[in-house]
């Protein structure tokens, strides 16, 4: 029976040709994605669904997709796909994380030039007949220091282009190894150093709990006077109100933003600020990028449907149907363990060791390791897929060790992830009981018993009376409910560890207040996939 693919958004005709050349029957309905009822009515006939951003693949749509094997998103973001529902149904979700990379990097470079020479304002003034030549004094790019925050795929391309412009590039990225930095020709630095040295700062990180407002009011105040700031990555990485104050004061000489905290950005505090260049999320908007992602997703989907090959899957590697019920809970556990450490270390990862004890060691541990590594990397590299994670780690100089051995403890299956960074070693263990839900049972040798939840607080503190009451009072005062509370300690009066599941994110001021409580050694806000 030939495989059938539905294209429900506008894709290049060349993508249609690729499917046909591979023997895949393709139906091209580029406006169908706008009509959910019609899509639901026909989706059951197809093995593959190729989309852009218009089609919303909800749990209801997936429930009708009895033959669906793969969803291909031409682009990076998969916010329009219910990935947990697809994963539960055994549907591979693919994207094209590198198809837009050059285009986005070039847009960041264009923004640098635009702010350096005040191009938009000079254009408007000239076309208004003012000829204000003396008003628009710019600066050269050559010889300046470019600070790159996030040196993944796009950040590395920006760094390469900037080096070609004879800029000196410094980079902050906890997952950038010294060897990789040397290969790129950049100087690896800490964020504090980057802020004080950079003439231009460009951001290329995902938006998560660790990177939200990474350029906060405090961080912006520490920047070099006359700095220019570029954000073509994600809205929310910069405190926009604080940036406006510094633009008005002249401390920040200019800024170029393609993304905003709220989009579509019909209004924003940055609009109208001196030497503020704004574009409407155009990072991927070139003819070449649109063609590239269409061709890539067609190639990937055709490969999977005809040969079983998987490229850029974002949920999990291919797993045999009979093994899936047993391995899926441990895939989720591995991702939780990786995500826990990825969100609780601050310096570059050197090595990750994963030990499988007991029954879990008989499963396909390569899939589990890939999930753990993906969870570890995603706080700084949001677009890392489970399949690609081990390769990405290797490229960044991170050593991955995997060991399976017989169990000799209290659990039928136990997974332990130990990560060595430039400044610390952190270890976390977990298991899965018969309910199939991931549990964290040890952190740095301290026993706990915590069900993984979408939102959690990780607290390390001195084991003294009254601390838990004070902490819970701070959380409660913010109007946030505590769902579960797991507590452990190494010894009486020693170090205590708490893992607290909460129903809503804590506001930044509340986190700061909780972190300032007497006895707190470490406090982290963690988030995990909803299926956790």
Image (spheres, helix red, strand yellow):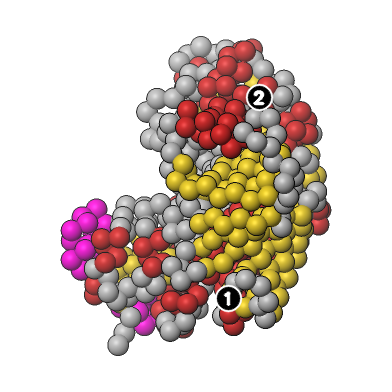
Label 2 residue SS: helix
Residue at 51%, 33% (x, y): give it: 475
160 w.r.t. 71: above or below = above
Q: Please state which of the two labelled residues, at mark 1 or mark 2, is closer to the viewer.
A: 1
Tell whether 188 sits left or right of 261: right
Label 1 residue SS: loop
Q: Residues within 10 Å of mark 2 (few under 14, many from 20)?
A: few
Gap in Å between the C-alphas at discs 1 and 2? 48 Å
Q: Residues within 10 Å of mark 1 (few under 14, many from 20)?
A: some
Tell whether 188 sits left or right of 150: right
Report the residue marked by disc 1.
Answer: 412
| Residue 182 in sight here | yes
- Locate residue 320, reporting x and y percent: 46, 82
Q: Nearer the viewer, residue 217 or 500?
A: 500
- The rendered magenta stretch, by its main secondary structure, is classed as helix
Outermost residue to the bottom: 1
Residue 30 within the segment the image draws in magenta: yes
Quarter of the figure that contains the N terminus: bottom left
- Locate residue 28, reporting x and y percent: 28, 66
**Magenta residue span:** 13-42
């Amino acid at each position: 029976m030939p495989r059938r693919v539905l294209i429900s958004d506008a894709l290049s005709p060349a993508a249609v040709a690729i499917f046909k050349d591979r023997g895949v029957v393709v139906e091209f309905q580029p406006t169908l994605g706008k009509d959910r009822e019609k899509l639901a009515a026909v989706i059951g006939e197809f093995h593959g669904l190729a989309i852009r951003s218009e089609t919303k693949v909800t749990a209801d749509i997936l429930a009708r997709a009895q033959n669906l094997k793969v969803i291909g998103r031409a682009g990076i973001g998969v916010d329009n796909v219910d990935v947990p529902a697809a994963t539960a149904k055994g549907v591979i979700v693919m994207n094209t994380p590198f198809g837009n990379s050059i285009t986005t990097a070039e847009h960041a470079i264009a923004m640098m030039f635009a702010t350096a020479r005040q191009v938009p304002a000079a254009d408007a003034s000239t076309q208004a007949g003012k000829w204000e030549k003396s008003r628009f004094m710019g600066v050269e790019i050559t010889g300046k220091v470019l600070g790159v925050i996030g040196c993944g795929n796009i950040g590395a391309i920006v760094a390469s282009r900037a080096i070609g412009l004879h800029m000196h590039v410094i980079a902050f990225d906890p997952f950038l190894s010294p060897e990789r930095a040397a290969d790129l020709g950049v100087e690896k630095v800490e964020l504090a150093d980057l802020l004080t040295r950079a003439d231009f700062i460009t951001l290329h990180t995902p938006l998560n709990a660790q990177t939200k407002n990474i350029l906060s009011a405090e961080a912006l105040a520490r920047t070099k006077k006359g700095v220019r700031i570029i954000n073509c990555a994600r809205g929310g990485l910069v405190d926009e109100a604080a940036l406006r104050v510094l633009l008005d004061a002249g401390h920040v000489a200019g800024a170029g933003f393609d993304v905003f905290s709220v989009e579509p950005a019909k209004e924003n505090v940055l609009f109208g600020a001196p030497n503020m260049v704004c574009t409407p999320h155009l990072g991927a908007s070139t003819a070449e990028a649109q063609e590239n992602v269409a061709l890539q997703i067609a190639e990937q989907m055709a490969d999977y449907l005809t040969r079983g090959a998987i490229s850029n899957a974002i949920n999990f590697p291919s797993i045999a149907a009979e093994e899936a019920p047993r391995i899926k809970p441990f895939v989720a556990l591995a991702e939780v363990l990786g995500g826990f450490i990825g969100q609780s270390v601050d310096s570059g990862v050197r090595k990750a060791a994963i030990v499988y004890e007991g029954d879990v060691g008989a499963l396909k541990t390569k899939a589990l390791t890939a999930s753990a590594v993906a969870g570890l990397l995603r706080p700084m590299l949001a677009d890392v897929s489970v399949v690609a994670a081990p390769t990405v780690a290797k490229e960044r100089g991170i050593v991955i060790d995997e060991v399976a051995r017989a169990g000799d403890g209290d659990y039928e299956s136990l997974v332990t992830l130990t990560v060595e960074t430039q400044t610390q070693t952190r270890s976390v263990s977990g298991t899965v009981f018969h309910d199939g839900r991931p549990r964290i049972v040890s952190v740095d040798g301290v026993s706990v018993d915590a069900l993984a939840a979408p939102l959690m607080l990780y607290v390390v503190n001195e084991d003294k009376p009254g601390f838990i009451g004070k902490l819970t009072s701070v959380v409660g005062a913010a109007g946030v409910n505590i769902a579960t509370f797991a507590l452990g300690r190494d010894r009486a009066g020693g170090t205590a560890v708490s893992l607290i599941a909460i129903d809503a994110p804590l506001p930044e001021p509340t986190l700061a207040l909780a972190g300032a409580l007497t006895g707190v050694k470490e406090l982290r806000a963690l988030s995990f996939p909803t299926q956790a």
